Image: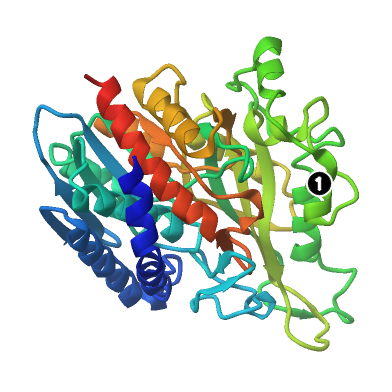
Amino acid sequence: MEHVKNYLEANKDRFLDELFGLIRIPSISSLSEHKPDMLRAAEYWKEAILKAGADKAEVIPSNGNPVVYGEKMIDPKLPTVLVYGHYDVMPVDPIELWDSPPFEPEIRDGKIFARGADDDKGQAFMHAKAFELMVQTQSLPCNVKFMVEGEEEIGSPNLKQWCLDHKEMLHADIILVSDTSMIAQDIPSITTGLRGLAFMEVEVTGPNRDLHSGIFGGAVANPANVLAKMIAQLQDEKGRITIPGFYDDVLEISPEERAEMAKAPFNLEQYKKALDIDEVHGEDGFSSSERTGIRPSLDVNGIWGGYTGEGAKTVLPSKAHAKISMRLVPNQDHKKIARLFEDHFKAIAPPYVKVKVQELHGGQGYVSPITMTAYQAAELAYTDTFGKKPVPVRSGGSIPIISTFEEVLGIKSILMGFGLESDAIHSPNENYPVFNFYKGIETIVHFYQHFTNLSK
């Protein structure tokens, strides 16, 4: 497929310029002040899909941020691939830790540094460019549809209803997603499983106002102290979550499956060095890869209360808050886990505080079978471009809407991610290697060819 390399080489600078235009839009879905930016990003995607060769593309309202839909139907008898991506990004805080402005993409050491460079603007935009390449070189072998949303980073709360409302329009044979990672640049992998998510916010209230910590300290319960003790009770010394019933639906992986997973390359010393930690920590009896791939987890994502500004202010806070996420394995229901968490958290609260618990968002886990045609096509595509067979891996991350697609649309998804662990997604200095961007485009083109051939 020499035409693929030729077209990439002739257009690679333009591809980056167009990606940078998308990245410069600060489309942060969790911050209301960026609402106009969400529409700007959606319009940018619509124009990108049209310029790439779609027969039509439009920005369609949802109950939240709009969804971009586009399509090119060359023959209804041919397979149809539905590409899913998202144009929203995470907040950039703490801004002072960025080495360059987060929405001014900059290439350093062969990497694009910017918020959304990997997650998911860089990875999703590969699909627009792969589509363009196939259209412009008259090599598109099947039908293509695009669905690009703006709420993935807040749990896609409105996309399920949007899919129900447009179910017929979204009919396809497979959903193609690039929003995951691979083991290394020289070790391609395909994500075959995602963890589910239950994301909670808790509030602990003591006195009816902030108090002077000298006059009242020691006589009135401090909600920040209480919250810290309550959080500490959520896990035991063996790293197991103490919520009653939490593990009831966890599917235990067989020794044979664990042995197969252990074949995936993993260097513990390099892992620790990259994170600048002396030791790893997690549930007893499992490796680091297993702890993120086949086991659930619980983490505090943020905690606050009282005075956190510069200098001293000796207060006993009235309230303390925390955001807590639980990553779930397939077969765990996020709604059930949220209920169990709320019941337990309230049960361990001492009588001298009041507690509120709210589930902010959540979703089910997902497993992508390695026996399906799309996996086989992806396997061949990676082999074509990387020169080696990809390794199937289960990701510790969550894309809650993926399981919803199967539930609502009845369509499986194939997760062809090209990010790396070092890309710092959700963190300051998020980045994405230029090599991966171009290699991803090339691999996606090969996927379409193999998927069409295998589907005949």
Label 1, on which residue? Answer: 270
Residue at (54% x, 34% y) in the render: 387
In percent of width and height, residue 380 lies at 43, 28
* Image quarter of the C terminus: top left
Q: Nearer the viewer, residue 413 or 301?
A: 413
In percent of width and height, residue 413 lies at 37, 33
Q: Nearer the viewer, residue 111 or 85?
A: 111
Which quadrant holds residue 408? top left
The color scheme shown is: rainbow
Characterize the local packing of mark 1: few (<14), some (14-19) or many (20 or more) Cα atoms within 10 angstroms: few
Residue at (62% x, 63% y) in the render: 427
Identify residue type, mark 1: Gln
Asked if residue 338 is positioned above or below residue 174 in the image, the reply reads below
Does any portion of residue 98 appear in the rendered image?
Answer: yes
Does any portion of residue 194 appear in the rendered image?
Answer: no
Query: From the viewer's perspective, is 340 left or right of 155?
Result: right
Q: SS class of the residue under badge 1? A: helix
Residue at (32% x, 69% y) in the render: 41
Q: Nearer the viewer, residue 423 or 238?
A: 423
Q: Residue furthest bottom?
A: 311
Query: From the viewer's perspective, is 160 left or right of 277?
Result: left
* Image quarter of the N terminus: top left
Residue at (78% x, 33% y) in the render: 283
In percent of width and height, residue 136 lies at 20, 53
